[in-house]
Image (tube, rainbow, N blue to C red):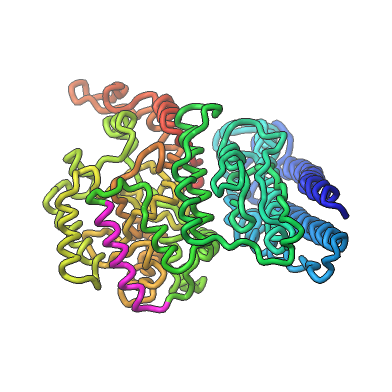
Amino acid sequence: MSISDYEKTIYNMRNVPLKRTKEVEERLVTALDMANAQLGSIIGRTDNPLSIKVYQGKRMKVVQMMNELGISLKRDITSAINEVANDVAFTEQDATNDLLLEHDDANLMVDFTEIPRQTADLLAQRYDVDGLRISSSIWAQSQVSEIENVVLSGIARGQSARDMSNQLSQFMLGGGTGMGTSVRAKAMRLARTEINNAYWESARRASIESPVVGAIKWQLSGRHPEYDICNLLAEENVFGLGRGIYPVEYLPAKPHPNCLCYQKDFLRDPSLWDKPKKVYTDAELTDAMKKALHTETPSSATGSKGFKEKQLQLFKDTVSNVIRKGMVGEAVSTAFRQAPDLPPDTPVAKLYNLLLDGGRSKADKLDAGFSKKAEYDEHGDILRQEWSQNLTVSDIGYAQKIGTALRSDAIPISVNIPITDQRVFKAMLKSGRSKNLFETGKGYGSADKELRKGWEVALIKEGLYGLDKSDVAEGVGYYDKMPPKQKPSYGALNLGDDPKGAASQYGNAYFELEPHVKNRSTFTPNNSSRNDQVSTFRNAETFSLSEEGREYQGSVDANRKDPSKYIEVQIWNGYDFKKDVKSLHINKSVLNDLKNPPPIYDARIKSFVPAPETDGYRDIEQDLREFSDKYGVEIVVHEDEETK
């Protein structure tokens, strides 16, 4: 096989996931159509109202039908993932070996038989927002709950079985409003995303093992609809190899669902095929990271200013995280300790570096079970998924690895906000960033500035445990020199992806922050005013093994039943809405209350009267749209039944 034939084979391989996706989608449509017809038959299509008693007699049929559908969907998607991983790996293997034979390099022939299994294992550990890949039965229970909310609501309104069946058909196949994304849309999205991820990961692993491939170019799909992070990944020259070209081991993963981008191999000179590939030094990786972090939005980018800024930040996070995983030894600590989003040479940056040194002091005294960032992401996905099934840390065997929650991108920081307070949300629309007690003079915990200062100084002293007294004094000095905006804002780890946020007592909506915010945060079990255990991401894994770390485990297990028990996050220098906030979450009932305020009692006439608009109620949907457009923040509205 000639080099041009090899390149043509690899190029055509991009059609493998497209073909498999089309086949799976056809099977999914058939299965969903049959399930929809079966559900309509169970509920009935008469004009008579359905009673609770009648539905209770049908319920087990609904449960059985959804269980069978979940098994069918999971089987088809998993089978397609395995087929794609096999097709890609063995196509790459055959093409590589034919090319090696053509150049008399039979001694370099490759064996990619383990790649499909490695790919399947990796994808099995990925967090699936719908839960279908993890457990078809758990997924089915979730769908049955949504179906029953429609049924019970319809029964209460005296809705006919025919109308109820039509509404459930919209839930199954799409086309309706008010019920979130249809089962069909969610299944199709999962199939397309995971099948293309199987192609991407299998091809990437083959390129790493191949002696002929030196780099990979990120190619945009011809179906790429609009500007997003993929344009940056395909156009920026981070490693100096050319636009969108990455060393094989530093190719980023696909950044969003439904991504159809593909890979183009850049081959090494045949004279180098029997030589080791280039190993990037820490200095070279640091330079690449700096290039990524200093990337600017291209003039050709389209979309709102907030959207473009959000895509740019996603690009910086994606590429820098891949590079960090490749750094070893002290370089990992240095890369994290740069805290690139903290203003350099400021009191807050100097203090946080000291806190990292304090964390390292603790970490050096203990033996961690694992330490690579990739492993934290992997275990974090599993921890979050199993947490959502109401298991405790001890149940799933992670009692000694609860530091995973602090490090993994799969466990987000949530910040609850009092969205019903018009003054607060209007102020947020104008400010563009979080503001703390020392800036506003107000707080939803204690509003006593001196008391808060005492708690934060105590937190710093505990965080600097193990350092010299002079270092501790220096850290407190940095705190005293901080302008108010550099002092921390507060959030909590949303371990179970609770739609109310991790600390709902502080507000009935919440921000989900971007993962990079953890790189400048400290963590405490429960409210930081009530304990003196402090951690950073640097010592998260080892701190959880200590006696002090047992409180973390207690917080994790207790949070499910008691919202006052949580892992608090102190976010130094606050957070910027454009750069640091991923999404804003609000429950549908809260949204409805804001749109339709309850009447108030007027003592003068001894009667209820409509609430005036000046009482804090307003066009909340307009405010949310304005916030989203201005800062590029996704707005997520949760159905009432999701409330835990």
Q: What is the magenta segment's predominant secondary structure? A: helix
Horizontal side of 487 relative to 338 (left or right) equals: left
Residue 179 picture location, percent across and down:
58, 37
Q: Quadrant of residue 104?
A: bottom right
Of 93 and 459, nearer the camera is: 93
Q: For the point 41% across and 26% down, which residue is it? A: 626
- In this rendering, the answer to whether 386 lies above or below 241 is below
Of 165 and 128, nearer the camera is: 128
Quarter of the picture containing the N terminus is: bottom right
Number of numbered tags placed on the structure image = 0
Horizontal side of 108 relative to 163 (left or right) equals: right
Residue 38 seen: no
Residue 599 picture location, percent across and down:
32, 27
Of 120 and 551, nearer the camera is: 120
Residue at the extreme front: 271
- In this rendering, the answer to whether 8 lies above or below 213 is above
Residue 468 seen: yes
Residue 470 picture location, percent across and down:
16, 67
Horizontal side of 19 relative to 584 (left or right) equals: right
Q: Does 56 appear in magenta?
A: no
Residue 189 picture location, percent across and down:
67, 43
Range of magenta residues: 349-367
Q: Does 350 appear in magenta?
A: yes
Q: For the point 24% across and 48% down, which residue is it? A: 346
